[in-house]
Image: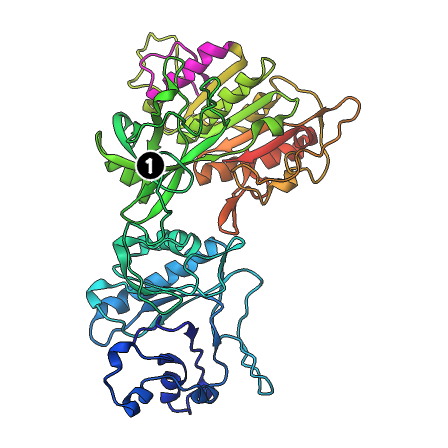
Amino acid sequence: MSLFSTRRFQALFHHVLRFRPQALAKGFLLPKKLHPAHEGLSPIHRDRLTRKEGYQGLLPGVQDVRDVLVLICGHTGRDARCGIMAPVLQTEFEDKLEMEGFDVLYGPVQVNLGDKQRIQGETGRGKTTARVGLISHIGGHKFAGNVIIYLPPDLKMGNEPHPLAGCGIWYGRVDPKNVEGIVKETILKGNVVADMFRGGIDAEHKMLRIGGYYLITPPSRPNTLNEITFVPYGITTREAISPTSFVITAVPRTPNPSLPYLTPSDNRWSYPLWSVEFKQPEVQISRHYTPLPPLSTEDPTDGSLRFYIRTVGDGEMSNYLGRRQVGEDVFLRGPHVGFELAERLGEHSRLVFLAGGTGVVPGIQAAKAVLEASEESSVDLLWAVRKREEVQKSAPPRQSSWKFWQEKKPTPLGTEVENPSPVTKRLQDLKMTYGDRLRIQVVVDEEGTRFQDKDIRDAIAASPGTVASFNAGCRFHDQSMHVYASEFALSDGPGCVCKSSEGTTPGKNLFIVSGPDGFIEHYAGPKIWLGGQQTQGPISGVAGYLQKQNPLLARDWLVLKM
């Protein structure tokens, strides 16, 4: 009997086990009306196969499902595969659901028995609730892990009904690495993953049939870059930087004369910070990557995008991209707009961007946008890399004027670097365009150089700005308002509410930290997970220490994490 063939979840507790099991089937699980195929049965036989509401009273406490249910086959009686996989998947689903902002509940469901004693249990804390549990055999040991996702009938996606509300979706061959994709695509977005789909029942008890990659698709799928669906891009070049890092160029398979990230009037990028998502189709996960700004000699209207990627340990996405070769496809979705720099800077003009590894890419984006916007602006870009080849393709000769390998402190990077890496070429291009308004410094981990507190303090003090003016509660300039903000553009709402006073200037200078999680945590404090997304979190680390030492930094500078 299929566990998702009914809209009700039978909350059976120890106190009701004395009732006959037939009450469950006859009161809730049997259909109200038989299929026409059963018309040949005798009236008595047909009566036995239909639901009888009178039996429902024998099972007090049964109620409509209000939680997202993840039901995992943990059967071990005939085959160990489901039993081995199920506990691992259970833990993974619980972790990923909590990470996405669900209130994962354990133990019995709290039910109201009217004048009878209430069954005590968890009810959640106002967030969308979910439960993950192991169930008995549902067929197909070879498909382990077997997972049924049930979305309650009243589930919402924002203010709209969830596309799969009331549906049960059955997946097979689910590995722990697939869990994040299932949570994001099926539970959060209402998409059914075709590669793992074994079957399903909709809210009307009809069988779900899949006709495309996802069960739920727009009437016409766009084939050019957009924020809703993933579209194919072909890899045209791949430039190796180090054994673990490279730059790829991807071109849309379908040319688009109206690229969504370009301003039609001048063909410049419309957003100071933006990214796209790459999809890993093997495990149905996506990750954001920031495109490198085009060189001054490159034409952005051809639609090509370049990405600086480093493969990381067991990182599913980075290793997947590491395996993609020239001529193969990748799938992109976007653009996704990042922090509004102009609104936060206001009439201020200083940006200090501290980047670790590939985190330099949004730094290049931000530097270009800030320097392009005002001739009064200046930028310090501090770039920390693991190995020398991230900056230069080969070791500089001993007679080089750029004694990069000999310095035990940050080294300025200019146009004189020999054999520059593809990323360094873009930094040099910016340097040639903006001259002394852009200062770039580099440290290399394998050379024993680091950015110390003094280096950051000196960069911030290099060009003293005017006194900032901001009001508490301004979502653009109050640091405390950023604790729960993501790194993406704010949703529609009030603009800056700051009122300038004599001797002050609206806005704040910006100190932005970008890179791996450990790098960000060291220099600015960790990000935090809230409501299914990473948010800025409070400021600590080196930046927090400098703010305590010099309160003027907290007043005049806004710290952001990417």
Q: Read off the magenta span.
A: 407-435
Q: Quadrant of residue 374?
A: top right
Q: Is residue 174 above or below residue 212?
A: below
In the picture provided, is 465 more to the left or to the right than 171? right
Q: Based on the picture, tell me whether residue 434 belongs to the magenta stretch.
A: yes
Work out which quarter of the rendered image holds the N terminus and state it: bottom left
Q: What is the three-letter code of the residue carrying label 1?
A: Asn
Residue 548 screen position, x and y as percent: 66, 35
**Can residue 246 be seen?**
no
Is residue 47 rendered to the left or right of residue 541? left
Q: Nearer the viewer, residue 35 or 10?
A: 35
User: How many circles with numbers are drawn on the protein?
Assistant: 1
Residue 58, given in percent of the width and then of the height, sits at 46, 89
Is residue 290 placed above or below 228 in the rendered structure?
above
In the depicted view, which residue is nearer to us: 70 or 81?
A: 70
What residue would you read off at disc 1? 223
Image coords of residue 346 (percent x, y): 65, 25
Q: Secondary structure at mark 1?
A: loop
- Residue 482 rendering spot, x and y as whole percentages: 60, 40
